Amino acid sequence: MPGLNIRVLMEKRIFIADRQNIFRFRHKVLHKIVEKFFEMEKVSFSLSLVLTDNQLIKKLNYRYRKENYSTDVLAFPLAAEYDLDDIRGEIVISVEKAQENAILFAQRVEKEIALYLVHGLLHLLGYRDYPTQVAEEMRREEKKILRSLDKELFDKLLIKKI
């Protein structure tokens, strides 16, 4: 695993820790996706985003959810837990899982990453994957936000495969 690469985009205090060695991303494009989300949902908050691999996300999934498998995205709300007004939470995305699912669903990896980011952001706003009716509402909101994103963003997100 390469050294920790942290980029801080101070406009909205979005902290990005890139801890994977599969793809190189343009972090400013991730920031633009978050900005579009904020605009559509009429919210704004600080956020920590971790891009990682299956090994680390599996450890986190087990530690915090007692699920012993790698997942695509985890979202950890922090404001309620620590009573902080300026930090809403942390999102952890497995880039390795995004690559696997992109192949499985014949999808671009960039779109998988955007989906996981939007999904995590919705979790931080209180959306849930269950029960079924609530999950359907979350899926509708995801689709609405993803449709609103500039197609050019997807083309700019990925720099190259490492």
Image (cartoon, rainbow, N blue to C red):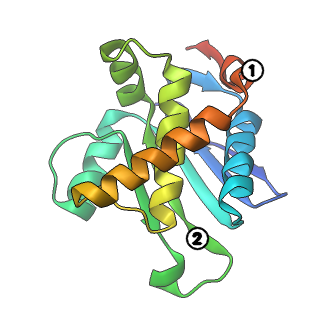
Q: Residue 130 appears in which quarter of the rendering?
A: bottom left
Q: Residue at x 69, y 66 (%)?
A: 43
Give the left or right position of residue 34, taking residue 99 as reference: right
Residues 113 and 70: in front is 113
Q: Residue at x 54, y 88 (%)?
A: 83
Residues 8 and 104: in front is 104
Whether 88 is drawn above or below 142: the answer is below
Q: Residues within 10 Å of mark 2 (few under 14, many from 20)?
A: many
Q: Residues within 10 Å of mark 1 (few under 14, many from 20)?
A: few
Type of residue at label 2?
Answer: Arg
Q: Residue at x 68, y 77 (%)?
A: 86
Whether 76 is drawn above or below 2: the answer is below
Name the residue at the bottom extreme: 83
Q: Label 2: which residue?
A: 88
Name the residue at the right extreme: 11
Give the left or right position of residue 98, taking residue 64 as reference: right
Residues 86 and 143: in front is 143
Q: Residue 58 appears in which quarter of the rendering?
A: top left
Spatial separation of the CA atoms under disc 2 and disc 1: 28 Å
The image position of residue 118, as x and y in percent, is: 53, 46
Q: Secondary structure at mark 2?
A: strand
The image position of residue 25, as x and y in percent, is: 64, 27
Residues 92 and 162: in front is 92
Is residue 157 something that shows in the picture?
yes
Q: Earlier in the sequence, mark 2 or mark 1?
A: 2
Q: Label 1: which residue?
A: 152
